[in-house]
Image (tube, rainbow, N blue to C red):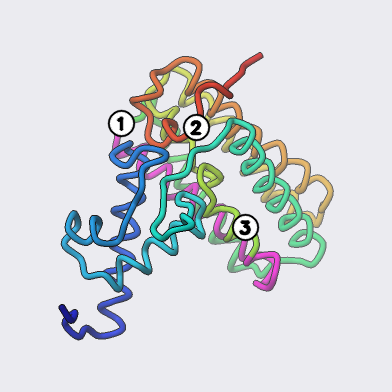
């Protein structure tokens, strides 16, 4: 049966919607690791035509959540703890290089002001004695925007593109494991530590202190690694979005 004609914009919009829904299903455990994901089954499940579904599956393979199978279709990937730790380490290394170069080359005042506005928004959230769901959502949005602005400070080019690619890797996003800390007693304390690092790196960029900025960002990524360890150690894996994709038999803690 021939698919109905749709415009390029509509197809792109549907592909994005399908990508977001499929990612949500994978991270929620509705599509467990190892499960085969075929176009036809997803078309029937989501009620979206095959062309945008095909595009969404390809994008999720590029993100690393899916792997292509030799005889067609895709399967949901699983990850070792080492995979996740290295992805976070790579993101911290690239962000460190980005902020070092930004400090050495100088940054447009507009970007610095916008980054500072993000941190002001985070300060407002953390001024509350406890974080409710709305406050947490504001924190995540401001945190993601701040990190995105850091990526823009080199003026685009290869490094910015590589950082964007790494951030799309499973669990490597700056907010990838923030959600897992949201309801823990230590959540606000961890966010305060992260915010102090945010302020320090922005100060280092302003002062043109490249080595200091790089060291702070690499240390900043260690918070995400700690969040992963704590989330898996102290909470039930099945209740944590996406952590079920990490192979339990590889998780070790010291």
Q: Residue shown at 70%/65% (left/top)?
A: 159
Query: Is label 3 in contact with label 1 (beta carbons under 8 Å)?
Result: no
Q: Is residue 182 magenta?
A: no
Quadrant assignment, res 58: bottom left
Q: What element carries label 2?
A: loop
Q: Which of marks 1 and 2 is nearer the N terminus?
A: 1
Chain part drawn in magenta = 133-161
Quadrant assignment, res 228: top right
Q: In which quarter of the image is the N terminus?
A: bottom left
Q: Could you tell me residue 63's position as x and y percent? A: 50, 55
158 shown above or below 214: below
Task: Give the labeled residue for mark 3.
Answer: 150
Eye-nearest disc, 1 or 2? 2
Q: Residue 123 carries which label?
A: none
Task: Give the labeled residue for mark 2.
Answer: 246
Direction from residue 98 to residue 125 in the image, left or right: left
Does residue 206 appear in the picture of this structure? no
Q: Is residue 151 magenta?
A: yes
12 shown above or below 91: below
Q: Residue 132 carries which label?
A: 1
Q: Could you tell me residue 151's position as x and y percent? A: 62, 60
Direction from residue 205 to residue 40 in the image, left or right: left
Task: Give the alpha-carbon distance from disc 3 to disc 1, as whole Å.
Answer: 27 Å
């Amino acid at each position: 049966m021939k698919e109905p004609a749709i415009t390029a914009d509509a197809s792109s919009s549907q592909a994005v919607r399908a990508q977001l829904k499929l990612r949500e299903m994978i991270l929620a455990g509705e599509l467990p690791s190892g499960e085969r994901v075929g176009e036809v089954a997803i078309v029937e499940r989501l009620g979206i035509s095959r062309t945008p579904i095909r595009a969404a599956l390809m994008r999720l393979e590029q993100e690393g959540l899916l792997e292509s199978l030799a005889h067609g279709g895709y399967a949901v990937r699983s990850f070792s703890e080492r995979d996740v730790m290295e992805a976070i380490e790579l993101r911290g290394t690239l962000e460190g290089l980005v902020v070092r170069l930004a400090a050495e080359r100088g940054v447009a005042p507009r970007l610095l002001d916008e980054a500072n506005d993000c941190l002001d928004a985070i300060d407002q959230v953390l001024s509350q004695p406890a974080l409710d769901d709305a406050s947490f959502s504001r924190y995540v949005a401001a945190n993601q925007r701040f990190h995105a602005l850091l990526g823009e400070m080199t003026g685009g080019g290869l490094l910015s593109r590589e950082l964007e690619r790494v951030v799309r890797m499973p669990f490597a996003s700056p907010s990838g494991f923030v959600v897992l800390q949201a309801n823990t007693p230590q959540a606000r304390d961890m966010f305060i530590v992260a915010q102090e690092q945010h302020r320090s790196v922005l100060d280092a960029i302003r002062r043109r202190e490249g080595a200091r900025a790089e060291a702070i960002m690499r240390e900043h990524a260690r918070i995400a690694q700690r969040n992963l360890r704590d989330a898996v150690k102290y909470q039930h894996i099945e209740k944590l979005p996406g952590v079920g994709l990490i192979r339990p038999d590889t998780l070790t803690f010291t």
